[in-house]
Image (tube, rainbow, N blue to C red):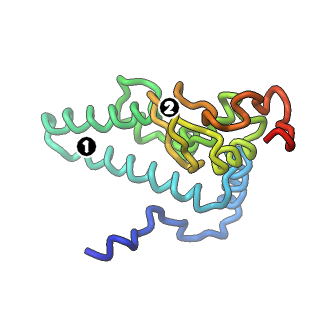
Amino acid sequence: MGDPRKSKKKWMGPSHPWIKINLGKEQILIGKYGLRNKKEIWIAQTMIRNFRHQARSLLALPPAERNIREKQLIQKLYRMGILEKDNSTLDDILSLTEENYLERRLQTIVYKKGLARTIYQARQLITHGHIAISGRKVTSPGYVVLRGEEDLIDYYPTSPFKQNPPSQGEVNVEQA
């Protein structure tokens, strides 16, 4: 089984990492979502690949079991916010891209909610502990925000940004 202290990697990199077209796409995604490295893209690609694999494997099941598992998978992806509609189909799952997953990261949602001026500042605010979800500090920019948690994202109660958010002006260093 393996040592529980040594977790296996949760991503799979590209088989040919130096293809020029892929390098360009990866650079665009890194800039758009403020990612630290390509590993974060590969994690998103692996997650989407796994969801798509689950959807393809459902096609081989008998109709009764397929309907039950299809609803479960669609509900899971809807709760995660990856699917937009609750009444989606397997075709919607098969058409997912890594951008659908990257849109659900805490870093992206903090930026889109206006809690940070830039996507890079959103990452910094999260890692420095200024962002909380329902009062609980989250320091991982790659945290996948569930649909129900999206409205609960705010500054941590003891953060200096709570009184003086970046959108209204910079925090004075002497006050912080």
Question: For the residue labelled by badge 1, is the local secondary structure a helix, a strand or a loop?
Answer: loop
Q: Is residue 176 left or right of residue 50?
A: right
Give x and y (percent) for residue 170.
Answer: 85, 35
Give the residue at x 48% y 65%: 12
Is the residue marked by circle 2 packed among few (<14), some (14-19), or many (20+) residues within 10 Å?
A: some
Question: For the residue labelled by badge 2, is the local secondary structure a helix, a strand or a loop?
Answer: loop
Q: Is residue 146 left or right of residue 164?
A: left
Give x and y (percent) for residue 113.
Answer: 65, 28
Residue at image mark 2: 134
Count the labels in the image.
2
Is the residue marked by circle 1 packed among few (<14), some (14-19), or many (20+) residues within 10 Å?
A: few
Amino acid type at mark 2: Ser
Say which mark, if any, is on residue 143. Answer: none
Residue at image mark 1: 59
Q: Are marks 1 and 2 in contact (CB under 8 Å)?
A: no
User: Tag 2 or tag 1, which sits nearer the N-term?
Assistant: 1
Amino acid type at mark 1: Leu
Q: Is residue 69 left or right of residue 165?
A: left
Q: Nearer the viewer, residue 162 or 85?
A: 162
Image position of 97 with respect to 115: above or below: below
